[in-house]
């Protein structure tokens, strides 16, 4: 099929690449012409495992192209996907101005029937507004249908998530649009759930909120584990073995971050309030998430006593491994907090340092060129993101490099007993701390 995607960010680019990879002809659009030129020259602006190969393969096969022109995209595709950002406004509301602008632009160049699909995460009832807007600016009176088709990919494993989705949600009114959408997804051989537009929009916010709730739940349990001497990993295993609960997303840590969960939970709270049915449970989810970082900092302060002038190594700056994304990363917040208290922080991240260098809140941080180098002379090591690379570091070398071998592991990467045997003072999340044997 001939498809176009407006917005070449994480979701747009990965979706476009995967659609092309299963045989569709795809035009990806962006209003940032520098980005378009870079993509045309074969440069991929984000790090996502496997993405570059998929893009190159499909550009070479002439199934994937890039343009700055919405008109070119709309003219040459049966289905137009919208994948532009929907950022959070200071009051928690979702900023839908990019969606509205794209809807107007599409309407202005619409001459024949098209299906307009919203892939961005939007508040329930946005589809209605998009349809109204297109109708208003539809100069040629062309027929169209609006569809909601939320995207559930995770950064770091976006290609696999897109190629093998748990489900495809299609929210639509028209049978014709549903048939076309089913054809788009036929090659993915995934279960398809067809709903009305409002339900499809709600599914995305409800799914992300539930996942965040699961993380906050285990994080709250981790505090109880620490206070009682239980082990949160074992507790998570024990409850996760119940198939009604499941073990996924029960990893305790320093809290969730990223470009989705914090924004989507805030949005869902605001939406529920605007609809007159406040979803207060989600406020507790947010509160627990913030408290988790504070509890971790408290342990660091209690152990090191004073942070001023302390040399602290930090492993990991991205909000999760296998991405270069540092948006709403708890790791960055932690570094900023410690710098404010006068600590001398040296950080290392396999992919996130380029973007981290531009963050003003952590301007005083030094960057190391390897995980080992970061620990040179350090009085403590903080693990903030669970990159596999860290699991493979020779810990005996780290112990030699550090002035005082103290580790605060915010992602439970290591076994406490082993760490004690290796001579570390080791603090983790929801597990008893160990001192060197
Ligand atoms: C999320 C959703 O998973 C995805 O379906 C949606 O499309 C976009 O938002 P993403 O933000 O890319 O994806 O990453 P995800 O793997 O969900 O992790 C989000 C945050 O939760 C990370 O900071 C991660 O470290 C944290 N997390 C995740 C935990 O702390 N514990 C867990 O068990 C799982």
Image (spheres, grey):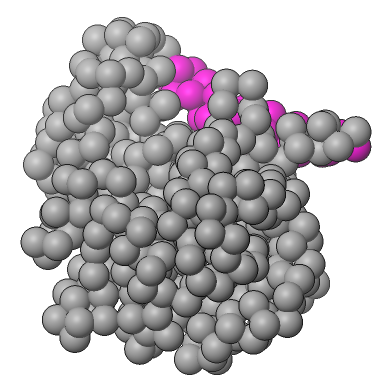
Tell which of 436 and 92 is nearer to you: 92
Q: Which residue is depicted at the point 37% across and 84% down?
A: 24
Q: Position of residue 28 (x, y in %)?
A: 32, 63
Q: Is residue 299 magenta?
A: yes
Q: Which residues are magenta?
A: 277-303
Q: Which residue is depicted at the point 36% across and 56% down?
A: 70
Drawn side of residue 425 relative to residue 101, left or right: left
Residue furthest to the right in view is 276
Drawn side of residue 108 relative to residue 70, left or right: right
Q: Position of residue 307 (x, y in %)?
A: 35, 13
Q: Position of residue 255 (x, y in %)?
A: 55, 40
Tell which of 435 and 63 is nearer to you: 63
Q: Position of residue 231 (x, y in %)?
A: 63, 51
Image vertical order of residue 225 relative to residue 120, above or below: above
Q: Which residue is depicted at the point 21% across and 54% down?
A: 36
Q: Which residue is depicted at the point 61% across and 67% down?
A: 144
| Count of number-bearing discs | 0
User: Is there any visible trace of residue 358 in the rendered image?
Assistant: yes
Tell which of 373 and 418 is nearer to you: 373
Drawn side of residue 356 relative to residue 125, left or right: left
Q: Quadrant of the C terminus?
A: top left
Q: Main secondary structure of the magenta part?
A: helix
User: Is there any visible trace of residue 219 in the rendered image?
Assistant: no
Drawn side of residue 32 relative to residue 266, left or right: left
Residue furthest to the front in view is 140
Q: Quadrant of the N terminus?
A: bottom left
Q: Would you identify the image quadrant in which residue 51 lies? A: bottom left
Q: Is residue 72 magenta?
A: no
């Amino acid at each position: 099929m001939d498809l176009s995607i407006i917005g070449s960010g994480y979701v747009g680019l990965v979706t476009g690449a995967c659609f092309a990879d299963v045989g569709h002809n795809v035009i990806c659009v962006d209003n940032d012409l520098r980005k378009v030129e870079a993509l045309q020259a074969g440069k991929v602006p984000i790090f996502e495992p496997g993405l570059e190969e998929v893009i190159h393969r499909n550009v070479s096969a002439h199934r994937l192209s890039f343009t700055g022109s919405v008109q070119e995209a709309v003219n040459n595709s049966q289905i137009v996907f919208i994948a532009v950002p929907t950022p959070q406004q200071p009051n928690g509301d979702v900023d839908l101005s990019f969606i509205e602008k794209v809807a107007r632009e599409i309407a202005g160049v619409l001459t024949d029937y098209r299906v307009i699909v919203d892939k961005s995460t939007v508040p329930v009832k946005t589809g209605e507004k998009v349809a109204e807007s297109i109708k208003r600016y539809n100069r040629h009176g062309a027929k169209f249908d609006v569809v909601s088709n939320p995207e559930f990919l995770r950064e770091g494993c976006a290609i696999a998530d897109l190629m093998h989705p748990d489900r495809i949600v299609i929210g639509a009114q028209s049978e014709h649009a549903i048939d076309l959408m089913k054809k788009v997804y036929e090659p993915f051989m995934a279960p398809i759930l067809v709903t009305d537009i409002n339900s499809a929009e709600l599914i995305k916010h409800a799914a992300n909120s539930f996942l965040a709730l699961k993380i906050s739940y285990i994080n709250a349990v981790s505090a109880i584990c620490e206070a009682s001497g239980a082990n949160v990993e074992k507790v998570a295993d024990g409850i996760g073995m119940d198939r009604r609960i499941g073990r996924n997303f029960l990893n305790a840590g320093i809290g969730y971050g990223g470009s989705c969960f914090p924004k989507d939970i805030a949005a869902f709270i605001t939406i529920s309030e605007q609809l007159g049915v406040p979803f207060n449970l989600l406020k507790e989810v947010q509160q627990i998430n913030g408290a988790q970082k504070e509890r971790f900092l408290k342990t660091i302060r209690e152990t090191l006593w004073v942070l001023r002038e302390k040399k602290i190594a930090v492993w990991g700056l991205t909000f999760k491994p296998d991405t270069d994304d540092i948006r709403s990363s708890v790791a960055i917040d932690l570094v900023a907090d410690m710098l404010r208290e006068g600590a001398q922080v040296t950080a290392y991240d396999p992919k996130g340092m380029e973007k981290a260098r531009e963050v003003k809140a952590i301007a005083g941080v030094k960057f190391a060129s390897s995980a080992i180098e970061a620990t040179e002379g350090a009085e403590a090591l903080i693990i903030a993101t669970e990159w596999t690379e860290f699991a493979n570091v020779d810990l005996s070398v780290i112990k030699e490099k550090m002035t005082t071998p103290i580790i605060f592991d915010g992602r439970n990467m290591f076994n406490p007993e082993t760490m004690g045997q290796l001579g570390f003072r080791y603090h983790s999340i929801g597990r008893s701390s160990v001192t060197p044997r």
